[in-house]
Amino acid sequence: MSTVILLLSLALGTYVVAVLEQWASTNRLRLAGPVISALRLLGQENILPRKSDRLFFEVGPVLLLIAALLSLAIIPLAPGLIATDLATGALFFNAALAYVLVAMIMAGWGPDGAYGMIGGWRFLGQLIAYAMLVVMPITTVAMRAESLSTIDIVTSQEMLWNIAYQPLGFALFVFAGMAMAFVPPFDLPVATGELAGGVEAEYTGARRIVFRLGRMVLILSVSSAIVVFYLGGWLGPWLPAWAWSMIKILSVAALMLLGGRMLPRIREATLLAWCWKLGIPLALANIFLVGILVLVVPL
Amino acid sequence: MAIELIVTLIMAAGLFGTGVYGALSQTNLVMIMMGIELILAAGLLNLVAFWRYLHPEAIEAQMFVLIVMTVMAVEMAVGFGVAIARFRSRGSVEMEEARELKG
Amino acid sequence: MSVQLVFLLAFGLAAVWFGIVVFRTHSMVRSALALLFSQTAIGAMFLVMQTEFLGVLQIMMMATEMSIMAIFMVMFMMDPGGLGEMDMKHQRKLSLGAGILAFAGATALALLADWGPIATEIPDAGEQVRLLGFELLGRSMLIFESAGLTILTAMIAATAMAVQAANRPEPAAPDRGPDRGKQHGH
């Protein structure tokens, strides 16, 4: 039963994220938009580039989708409504999303095209920028919950959500999460304006649908992680637990997509400089502060 | 019967042998590092197998695995540092051309 | 045949197979990613052996490590796509012999040694994480801290080796734009 609910909410969530993404990029809210796009892509010819690395070309988008789906496995929507409650859930989330990088490199290298390859390697640079800023805020969340399990992390926020308890960590995690899901302004690997689609450029037809789908699930997964780690997961008054989870996850996704559009795309070198010169010292300071807070005001 | 342990150890032996072959046969510095990574990975596998099947009460074994993972990362960082320096000065990281190290 | 044994065999054979692919393929990116999948299979074996924390850590660390390996391969190899079928091996017989000898020796040891009683009861995953945490910040704290220090030293050493010396002129490579960091690719 809970499997069916989880799958249905996954499908619904992905669809809504797809609608939101289209709204953010075209400024028109069309509920049937994703269906129309999918049908149009299905009608397109499946082009196979010349001299492509066929294996990587085929596996790349599928691996992206699988990695994003796996990272969703540790997200609890309500007490008991979780795919697998791992003892190392918070770490597993990272481990699964590290394979997004592998998928991007494969998909970028595979088709033997300059734009795709630059996009794929760009994401590697982007990962070096954001990786520490994902792990260090998760450390502080785990410090407060005294556990890596996502259910314990949610229940630890019963008194006060982590967004109020450690706002610095929240800011850093949202920043890093947006870079991880490569939503604008961090969409360096698929920069439509300057790289003609980057990693996506050589993909057409059904393969592109898989790629897009993977990306939507990735955005959904990152926003669920923000909700679980910082916004109290399913906690909330009046409404049932699953409703709170849904509302929070989708609004975080909407804010990420719509807010990110307002900002100019960041340069790779600037992103690296900001993350390493400013972000990591702040993340370390956050660990220090939360360490004191956990000892002094254990809420 | 220690069949699981023995199977794991044989798999680790296979990785070790492959790693030794790679580290000795390749001419490129980066490929040699790949061989060394395989050797270290075989070591990791042995450590975990020994912890799991022989001494699960000794949690220090997991600690040792963490240290070996650190060594892997450090080896890569320093190796790539050497590779960049060599590529800068000689324009290649082919080890056949690094005869001057023989003295 | 227990379920554990079947999974150990499957992932183990996958790890060894990908390990062999590393040195057989001509494409450098394929070679680096084959190593990644070999390491991932090892991480999966850790998971099968109920070492959840180490397994997830291995799977996570290797993804980034081997991707970085891949970009270095592309930067430093003459033929990264493997289309030129370049030969990059030397001392074939010696290395093949050494590899087979190492495998045979380790296998013989695994088969011949008396391993004694096999443990069946192990702490569950959450308990393991807790114990490991106490171990890291308790008795083994000094070792753990020196590992951290080693990483710091290695970072500084690698950076010091890799940065362009200030007083040395640029090597006579064609200038390809203002971004120095990206220049030494080809």
Image (cartoon, rainbow, N blue to C red):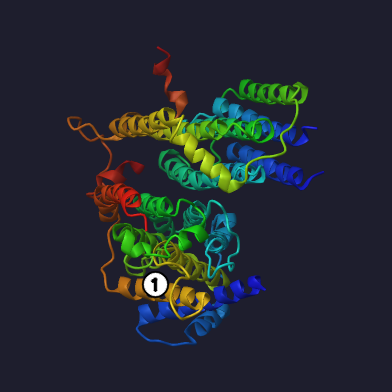
State the image coordinates of residue A168 (x, y, percent, origin top left): 29, 58
Please, which residue is most extreme toward the right here? C1
State the image coordinates of residue C161 (x, y, percent, origin top left): 31, 30
Residue C170 horizontal side relative to residue A214, left or right? left
Q: Secondary structure at mark 1?
A: helix
Residue A56 can be seen, yes or no? yes
Residue C109 horizontal side relative to residue A111, left or right? right
Residue sitting at x 48%, y 40%: C133
Q: Nearer the viewer, residue C58 or C24?
A: C58
Q: Nearer the viewer, residue C153 or A159?
A: A159
State the image coordinates of residue A260 (x, y, percent, origin top left): 32, 70
Q: Nearer the viewer, residue B10 or C101?
A: B10
Q: Nearer the viewer, residue B82 or A47?
A: B82
Residue sitting at x 56%, y 48%: C126
Residue C82 can be seen, yes or no? no
Numbered-mark total? 1
Please, which residue is most extreme toward the left here? C167
Please, which residue is most extreme toward the top here? B103
Residue sitting at x 80%, y 32%: B1
As drawn, C152 above or below A30: above
As drawn, B46 above or below A233: above
State the image coordinates of residue B22 (x, y, percent, origin top left): 58, 30
Quadrant into which the N terminus of chain A falls: bottom right
As drawn, C26 above or below A102: above
Residue assigned mark 1? A252
Q: Residues within 10 Å of mark 1 (few under 14, many from 20)?
A: many
Quadrant into which the C terminus of chain A falls: bottom left
Pointer 1 chain: A
Residue C6 horizontal side relative to residue C23, left or right? right
| Amino acid of disc 1 | Val
Name the image quarter holding residue A230: bottom left
